[in-house]
Image (cartoon, helix red, strand yellow):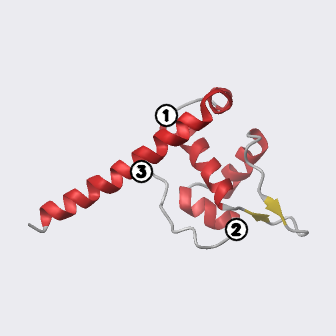
Amino acid sequence: MAFKEFELKKIYFSIGEVAEMFQVNTSLIRFWETEFDILQPKKKATGARRYTADDIDNLKLIYHLVKEKGFTLDGAKTKIKEEKDDIIKRQKMIVTLDKLKSFLENLKENM
């Protein structure tokens, strides 16, 4: 998964921090915001976006469908409407399995 796992200790993240997490341009994040209803970051009076952990989870979902699975934007929107909970469960399982794999590989190297 290209998404960089960060510990989400902060309450709000800037668009630059979010773009860095996903290794994409800030313009893509702003574009997805206009395309996907599930993505609605808070905005300061200055217009600066503030992303929460929930926003980042929604971005993970969008990123997974569009960038990793190759869905069109319309296809991703439909998939999210129909199967959001199932996709999230599968994503969490994949992340857990990747962590387990890394742990086991690390364990094997140190034997």
* Left or right: where 47 falls relative to 49: right
Task: Please provide percent x and percent y for residue 76.
Answer: 63, 31
Residue shown at the point (27%, 53%) measured from the top left: 101
Task: Please provide percent x and percent y for residue 52.
Answer: 69, 62
* Left or right: where 36 falls relative to 109: right
Task: Please provide percent x and percent y for residue 83.
Answer: 60, 30
**Residue identifier under label 3:** 95
Residue shown at the point (58%, 43%) measured from the top left: 61
Q: Nearer the viewer, residue 39 or 66?
A: 39
Label 3 or label 1, whichever comes before in sequence order: 1
Q: Nearer the viewer, residue 53 or 65?
A: 53
Quarter residue 20 falls in: bottom right
Task: Please provide percent x and percent y for residue 1.
Answer: 43, 49
* Left or right: where 14 falls relative to 97: right
Q: Secondary structure at mark 1?
A: loop
Q: Secondary structure at mark 3?
A: helix
Distance, label 2 to label 3, CA atoms, is 24 Å
Which mark's residue is nearer the viewer, 2 or 3? 3
Residue shown at the point (58%, 73%) measured from the top left: 9
Label 1 or label 2, whichever comes before in sequence order: 2
Identified by mark 1, the residue type is Lys
- Establish if 51 lies above or below 65: below
- Rate crowding at label 1 as few (under 14), some (14 to 19) or many (20 or more) other CA atoms within 10 Å: few
Residue shown at the point (67%, 26%) measured from the top left: 78
Label 2 or label 3, whichever comes before in sequence order: 2
Q: Quadrant of the C terminus?
A: bottom left
**Residue identifier under label 2:** 14
Label number found at residue 39: none
Label number found at residue 69: 1
Residue placed farthest to the left in the image? 111
